[in-house]
Amino acid sequence: MIVVRAPLRISFVGGGTDIADFYRKHPGRVISTAIDKFVYVAINRTPLIPKISARYSISETVDRPDDLQHTRIKAALLDMGIGKGIEIGSFASLPAKTGLGSSSSFSVALIKGLNAFAGKKMDKKEVAEAASRLEIELLGEPIGKQDQYAAAMGGFNVIQFNPDESVDVEPVLLDYKKRLGLENNLLLFYTGLTRAASSVLTEQKANIGSKFETLKEMAGSVDEFRDRLLVGDFKRLGGMLHEGWLKKKSLASNVSNSTIDDLYNAGMDAGAWGGKVLGAGGGGCVMFIVADDKKPAVREAVKKVAKEKNLNEFQEIPVKFVQSSAEIVFNGDEFKNKISI
Amino acid sequence: MKDFITEFSKKSITAIENLPHDEIAKALNILQGVYERDGRVYVFGNGGSWAIAGHWVTDFNKTVFSHHLAEHNKRFRVSRMPATAEELTAWANDVGYDMVFAGPLDNVLEDGDVVIAISSSGNSANIIKAVEVAKKHKVPVIGLSGFDGGKLNQLADIKILVATPKGEYEIVESTHDTVMHMMTKYFKNYFDHLVEAKK
């Protein structure tokens, strides 16, 4: 058995500029951090059971990878030439489609785990590249690359997507006081509304031509966000999130909806410095940066709207930022390799 | 006599002033990560650097938590490599002195671990062999070197070079000690803060 975990992430500014239609013309830039919520993938070698099993929200047992319904597991197994004798299960700290990048965290953990299964060790960038390739090239999903890099690299980073497909990851060298300070001024709520990133991103992708200048501004704001973060100017960070969210809303008609707008406006009216909806939009999480003394008021205001709208799964999600990246937490596989020197 | 003391002190001050701040900050991030995931840190070096490695073990495993030992039931897991003189002499005698770190390290390295390699010249054959083993395991290497950095500074993921003229072992080793103590102090403050913020 091999167990791999990969963190979820919070993306602050620059989201949307990690899509090829944009970064092939102008470098995309995002700033994000890994958080203490994880997706786990467990992989078990079953030489005596010549089948393929995938256990997630449903359980599948098939004779050949081609017969799997789970598109990512199927594509990864076919790509790696793993034909039978394997069980793969996934587990997570939060539901899917929260806007915290969990679907790419899954791919990252899967890729790292399957390579360990095949006796291959990978460094962080190799994992990020392989997970991006799986989702974008092999499966043709209309998504960007920021989530794969955030999960594979861990920590707080500025990530730049270059026109030649190379990616630069620059860690934000935050001391613990600033890190804990931002954590303390951040409120995150899961709306209970779910959306698949692809539905929003498909429209967003089609609009890239007309919104090119907006996306350029979003990529360009990453450096200021980092610099303000390094000096602990949380108020301005909130303001920048708010400006970024308004820009993001203009990218596609379904980025927001009236429920999301009501939740967001309630938090802002109660005194938040700023905020945004996490993920591609249309649901997921609402996040605010708030002064310490305004936190109770913002919390109450947002909860009240959630209750009025009957959002049964609405809840606050406490988060800490982590340096953890995708990592093998257990490897008891019988063919666990020893590297000879 | 006084001239000698003044000159040595000046060299030490210059070495500390020229420390690579970004690389040290990156090393702190990496060590934060290994702490979060309960990974292991392996430290090694020859001679005086071996002494720094031993000091690192005690400061990270105990000193950084000292003010609130009872509250920190999760701690760093740092080891000097190899753990015993018996293992060191066995590898040296039976296989070769260049394998005294690489051999034991290859036995234990896991995904999520970190290696700290210390070499003033950056060219000790046994240090470089060990760094190559860490690279094959895809484990990040924090390299503390001196002089022109040598091969260690080229290979390390985190390059903490104390740049000095060749042969200034005393300046390099005491500055490596400063780096180790700087990291100790950072984590000590951090772990103190975590406990005190709760009160």
Image: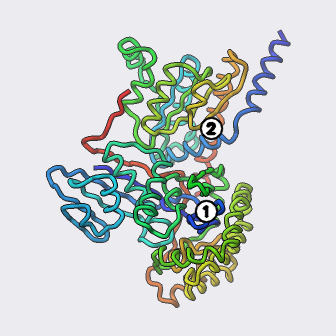
Q: Can residue B81 be seen?
A: yes
Task: Decide if residue B119 is on the left or right side of residue B37.
Answer: right
Q: Are marks 2 and 1 on the same chain?
A: no
Residue type, mark 2 in image: Met
**Is residue A259 positioned above or below A334 on the image?**
below
Q: Residue furthest top?
A: B1
Distance between mark 2 and mark 1 Cα atoms: 38 Å
The reply to whether residue A293 is in sight is no
- The answer to whether residue A332 is left or right of residue B147 is left
Residue A178 lies left or right of residue A155; in this view the side is right
Would residue A94 be found to the left or right of residue B186 on screen?
Answer: left
Could you classify mark 2 by the number of other residues whose Cα lies within 10 Å: few (under 14), some (14-19), or many (20 or more)?
A: many
Mark 1 falls within which chain?
A
Which label was assigned to residue A279? none
Q: Nearer the viewer, mark 2 or mark 1?
A: 1
Q: Position of residue A51 (x, y in %)?
A: 18, 58
Of residues B7 and A219, the one drawn nearer to the viewer in this rendering: A219
Residue that numbered label 2 is attached to: B183
> What residue occupies the far right of the structure in this picture?
B3
| Observer-nearest of A311 and B100 | B100
Question: Which residue type does callout 1 highlight?
Answer: Tyr
Q: Residue at x 68, y 83 (%)?
A: A269
Q: Residue at x 68, y 74 (%)?
A: A242
Q: Chain of mark 2?
A: B
Residue located at (73% from left, 57% from top): A227
Q: Position of residue A97 (x, y in %)?
A: 45, 73
User: Residue B143: x, y in percent?
Assistant: 58, 31
Look at the numbered disc 2 and give the secondary structure of its residue: helix
Instruction: Report helix, strand or loop for mark 1.
Output: helix
Residue at numbered disc 1: A23
